[in-house]
């Protein structure tokens, strides 16, 4: 894989780090606003093998926040558009496309083979829990994005272990479900500490709920929540940076210290 396009990264992290990223195998599940932005940075950072998973197509309402969504891509498969974009950024990246809906039956195919990292950018409760549980119990490193919709303040987005996150209704629901399934600490998440009022429900509960909803191509009801491109992009970039830090064993953060203007150090 050519190094010239990754020169700025090697100047900061060294040639060895770039070579390491070229050899890494990543599974990214969910190609919406957060997952699409995360994928953009993974491709531009030189990750050499990426399996992308999403069953959905691009809709007109995606354009406000999803990097894969334009008027030219409306109606197309998110996974196919994502594959084309990765190849346009880094033709030497190996891309596997799985246009699957995530559930207990499909996770085995999604997690098949040697994997260095699973990245969860799913926005639905039950599929998210199925993926996280499977990766955790198979001891595959996994990171996850919690809820980005309904948030207005991008400066409150941060990182924590899932079991220590706060202020996020989705994280609360995921945490409760996974604890009952024997999942504990060890899943780092990107979340917002901004307090919002919303209750995440299972698919069965949502079927009879009274909310503004749309029907996906798979016949699934989806809650339509307000979201900003600035906030979802921050979530995606935080998730990508956490992924790179994980793949490089924290090397990307080596030597990073906060400057204290009070002490001048």
Image (cartoon, helix red, strand yellow):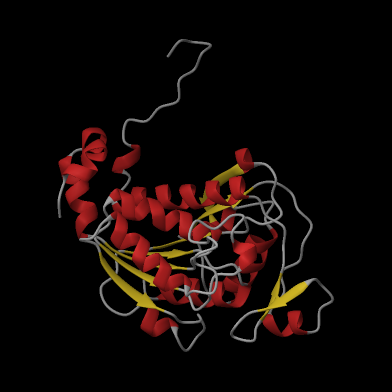
Q: Tell me the quarter of the image containing the C terminus.
A: top left
Q: Nearer the viewer, residue 13 or 264?
A: 13
The residue positioned farthest toward the front in the image shown: 72
Q: How many marks?
A: 0
- Please determine whether, in this image, residue 161 is positioned above or below residue 136: above
What percent of the width, then of the height, locates residue 174? 61, 68
Q: Quadrant of residue 168?
A: bottom right
Q: Is residue 246 left or right of residue 170?
A: left
Residue 173 placement (x, y as % from top left): 67, 67
Residue at position x 66%, y 46% from top?
193
- Residue found at the very far bottom of the displayed protein: 105
Of residues 20 and 211, which is closer to you in this image? 211
- Residue 127's spot in the image, x, y percent? 55, 77
Residue 230 falls left or right of residue 40: right
On-image quarter of the N terminus: bottom left
Relative image position of residue 99 (x, y in whole percent)? 43, 80
Q: Give the residue displayed 46% in from the left and 52% down from the top.
A: 239
Question: Which residue shows up at 49% across the image and 68% down it?
Answer: 30
């Amino acid at each position: 894989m050519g190094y010239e396009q990754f020169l700025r990264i090697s100047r900061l992290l060294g040639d060895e780090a770039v070579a390491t990223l070229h050899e890494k195998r990543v599974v990214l599940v969910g190609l919406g606003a957060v997952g699409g932005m995360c994928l953009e940075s993974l491709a531009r950072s030189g990750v050499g093998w990426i399996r992308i998973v999403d069953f959905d197509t691009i809709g007109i309402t995606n354009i406000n926040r999803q990097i894969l969504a334009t008027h030219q891509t409306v109606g197309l498969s998110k996974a196919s558009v994502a594959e084309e974009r990765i190849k346009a950024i880094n033709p030497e990246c190996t891309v596997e496309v799985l246009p699957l809906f995530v559930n207990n039956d499909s996770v085995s195919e999604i997690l098949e083979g040697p994997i260095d990292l699973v990245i969860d950018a799913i926005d639905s409760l039950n599929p998210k829990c199925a993926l996280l549980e499977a990766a955790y119990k198979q001891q595959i490193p996994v990171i996850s994005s919690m809820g980005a919709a309904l948030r207005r303040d991008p400066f409150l987005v941060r990182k924590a272990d899932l079991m220590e996150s706060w202020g996020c209704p989705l994280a609360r629901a995921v945490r409760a479900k996974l604890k009952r399934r024997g999942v504990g600490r060890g899943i780092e998440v990107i979340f917002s500490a901004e307090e919002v009022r919303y209750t995440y429900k299972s698919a069965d509960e949502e079927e009879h709920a009274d909310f503004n909803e749309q029907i996906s191509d798979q016949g699934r009801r989806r809650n339509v929540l307000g979201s900003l491109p600035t906030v979802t992009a921050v979530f995606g970039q935080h998730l990508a940076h956490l992924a790179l830090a994980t793949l490089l064993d924290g090397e990307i953060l080596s030597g990073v210290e906060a400057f204290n203007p009070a002490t001048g150090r």
